[in-house]
Image (cartoon, rainbow, N blue to C red):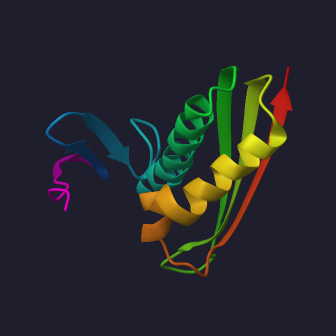
Amino acid sequence: MKPPLSATLVWQGDLRFSAKTPRSEITLDSDSTAGPSPPEALAMALAGCMAIDVADIVMKGRHPMTALEAAIAGARADDPPRRFLSFALHFTITGAVPAAAVERAIQLSRDNYCSVWHSLRQDITFETTFEIRA
């Protein structure tokens, strides 16, 4: 079992916090000026988790990927707690990577590896798409 994740948040005034782990630091800001808001950070974490998995799986398959970009959009409820209702994640991959390899990498990430996705409510609609550029 992995050791527990730990973080410390310190109030910086207004609705802004310095969030630190033993290895890194970001600012969480309700206004999204000094750093991402907590919901933005969650969306970025989901996109980052999936993108890291997809890159790892594609590279382990020895496919000649030269770039990967992930763009996420999340829809939230209008009323508090304004939880996420859906996410749409689009990957743009550059290189001579077979579409089947990308589809497999996305599916493996979603079904088996992405801890962020598996930590969210499973009634959230989650659409993934991709395109390959030569």
Give the residues drawn in magenta, as a range: 1-13
Q: Position of residue 33 (x, y in %)?
A: 45, 37
Question: 16 above or below 52?
Answer: below
In percent of the image, x 45 and y 49: which residue is there? 41
Residue depicted at x 55% and y 33%: 60
- The residue nearer to you, when weighing 39 against 62, is 62
Q: Quadrant of residue 116?
A: bottom left
**Residue 25 image offset from top left, x and y in percent:** 25, 35
In this view, the residue farthest toward the front is 61
Magenta span includes 3 = yes
The quadrant of the picture occupied by the C terminus is top right
- For this view, does 106 lie left or right of residue 60? right
Q: Position of residue 131 (x, y in %)?
A: 83, 38
Q: Choose between 30 and 41: the one closer to the eye.
A: 41
Q: Position of residue 121 (x, y in %)?
A: 51, 78
| Rendered view: 108 above or below 64 | below
118 sits to left or right of 73: left
In the rendered image, the quadrant that contains the N terminus is: bottom left
The residue sitting at 75% across, 50% down in the picture is 103
Q: Nearer the viewer, residue 63 or 54?
A: 63
Above or below: residue 56 compared with residue 123: above
